Image (cartoon, grey):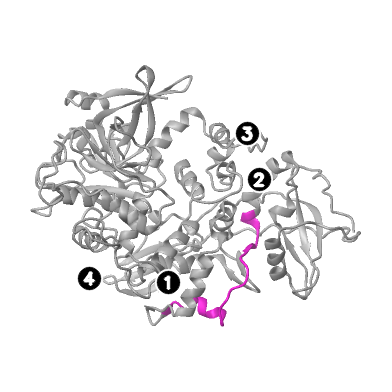
Amino acid sequence: MQTFRYSPLADPNEIRLLKLLPGGFDDEIQLRISHHELHVPQKQQSTKWAVKQLLDTLPPEWEVHETYEGRYLFLRTSDNSRNVLEESWEHPDPAIPRHMCHEQYTDNFQPRPDENDTGPWLKLECRESLIIALRHLRSAQYPRTLWIDAICINQADEAERVRQVRRMGMIYTLAALSSGLGPLHMSRRDEFFCILDNGHLVLDDETWSTIKELLSRSWFQRLWRLQEIQLANPRDSLMQLGHHAIKVSHWCRVIFFLLISRDILPPERFLAVSSAARMATPVAGAGCSTVLDTSLRKKCSDPRNHIYGILGLASPGLASSISPNYAASWTAADAFKDAIPQQDRATLVWEFAHDLYAAGFSSAEWAFEAPGVLRVTGAACAVVSGACTPVLPTASDDEGVTIIRSWEPDGINTLPYLPARAGASASRRRAHLINLSMGMYADHAPMRAELPSLQQLDDECVEAGLYLPKPSSAPPRPEQTDTPYGANIYDILRHCSNRRYIHTHEGYMGIAPAHTEVGDIIAVFLGCENPVVLRPVADGHFRFVGLAYIHGLENANGLLGPLPHPWAVQQKRVYGDLILYEFVNTETGAVTVHDPRLGDLGDWVHTPADLRVPDSGVPRIYNGTFARGTEVMNSDLRMLPEALRARGVPLRTFSLV
């Protein structure tokens, strides 16, 4: 039998489709490969309102939530509790047109029937894993039309790969079948979805064993599978599990339900679910940093695909700047530099930073100077004087705990935490605990119900042996559990992975990138939520090392000094990932969005983030907008560079290379 040879795609709009002919499970696999034109269907103008708009139309006691499939669920709750009294897929006000609450869909791509489905049989070499998948996908009665990148793209034709990779996002969007994961090993498929029984979480051993085995498959770690899940049609895209198929939306619904059941789910089960949730959490069209961060967590055989594999997920602006190049001389670094314009690379520093309020609501000030120098305004706050052993990504859980235990600062129970900007009431033990959690505790973020209090976290850290008292042997492993530690300890291990503990000459302690060295500078850039680590190099320039968590430099302390007693900063999530920072008087309970360290706004008006339209274009890291007449800015005018210099803040320019 002759070997199959690809014929070129004659038209830029053409793709290959394969027809999997019917047969028994063990029969020889027979495919028909043909060319078809793929035209992007014209997208209808959506008449569906955003959640924020619908909220203004609801009667009292009603609220609206969006499901994973994009449907709106309307709930009526009681005044005094979160008890749901009524729920509906329809708006409670019949006067609201239905098209404002429901998306109008267009038909999926349907290939034309082959004009000529005859010809000699040819041999096609495939990986064993693909052959197994095709056996499970094959029907005994009827042919199935499939698109499989390993077959439908001529991998030996570099020009074709470039063209087809750019179209993969659209193909995934139009496909009715997401992917095959192999057989599902359980006695009854329905048990997979039996996680609710009379309002209580039910996960018998067989069901959990199935979920765990499924989540551990390499399919969920592959980069290209990320696009399949993210871009799947929410109405009818399927995941093939052996001979059975489930809706992608049902799978994601199961994962998200388990994710919010942290208080009920054993730690080892929650950890497995939280990893899978990253696959299902929508990132399509998100900012460059969000998409890149998600991509870098996945595996691919060609590192250049960490860039090219996000084409379908990237915003139109980012996607248009990416031109796949698979030439042998073209490296992953070349792919990144080519995809992200030089002037935009600077913004990644700000985008990757999150939720620490290190620079308050200041306005970023930077300028790019060719060739390759970025000048950024900020304040130098500390110099690294000590760097502990890092927790490498390859470290086991027990190794990570042992290394973190070695980070315990001297005098953890007897010495105060002394940096001038940290506040007089801080203790070394409290500062160390906050650093290990990287600020993720309930006292600081009360809207995160799954987070522990500092006291609870302290108790768990002592029990796990992360610090006092130091155990003489390895921490005991509870019997009959998949993992030896609780979910909060695993959060700390995750925070500290690929990082090391540092001390500074000024008395600060914190968590920094694993390659941080003695002599590195800790700085706060204006407009950036995290302190940054910089390394001095030749000619007064600096090299960006990474982001850090330094207790005492959050909450704009590095620029404005510590908050006056008894004020504290708390986070409040108001819309999606949007964080609103509030200042709480811990004695009176008073809450305000105005920083007590700053003066009066004068004739400027501050519109908090929870009152503005979500798609206004204002970056999410700000608390809202500041306006005076027709003049509007998305940073606090009292923290503009000139205002901070007038306060005596020692701002300087850092030249990054």
Quickly name the residue at label 1.
88
Residue 439 visible? The answer is no
Answer whether labels 3 and 2 touch (C-beta < 8 Å): no
Between 460 and 588, the one nearer to me in the picture: 460
Left or right: residue 442 compared with residue 234: left
Q: Is residue 549 above or below residue 337?
A: below
Q: Is disc 3 surrounded by few (<14), some (14 to 19) or many (20+) residues within 10 Å?
A: few
Q: Is disc 4 surrounded by few (<14), some (14 to 19) or many (20+) residues within 10 Å?
A: few
Q: Amino acid at mark 3?
A: Trp
Q: Quadrant of the C terminus?
A: top left
Tell me the number on the disc at residue 165. 2
Q: Is disc 2 surrounded by few (<14), some (14 to 19) or many (20+) residues within 10 Å?
A: many
Quickly name the residue at label 3.
330
Quickly name the residue at label 4.
80
Q: Which of pointers 1 and 3 indicates the residue nearer the eye?
A: 3
The percent coordinates of residue 525 (x first, y second) are 31, 32
Mark 4, secondary structure of its residue: loop
Residue 559 visible? The answer is yes
Quick one: label 4 or label 3, which is nearer the N terminus?
A: 4
Q: Amino acid at mark 4?
A: Asn
Quick one: label 1 or label 3, which is nearer the N terminus?
A: 1
Give the residue at the far front of this rendering: 472
Quick one: label 4 or label 1, which is nearer the N terminus?
A: 4
Q: Which residues are magenta?
A: 172-196
Q: Which of pointers 4 and 1 indicates the residue nearer the eye?
A: 4
Mark 1, secondary structure of its residue: strand
Q: Amino acid at mark 2?
A: Val
Q: Which of pointers 3 and 2 indicates the residue nearer the eye?
A: 3
Q: Amino acid at mark 1?
A: Ser
Q: CA distance from mark 3 to mark 2?
A: 16 Å
Left or right: residue 503 compared with residue 173: left
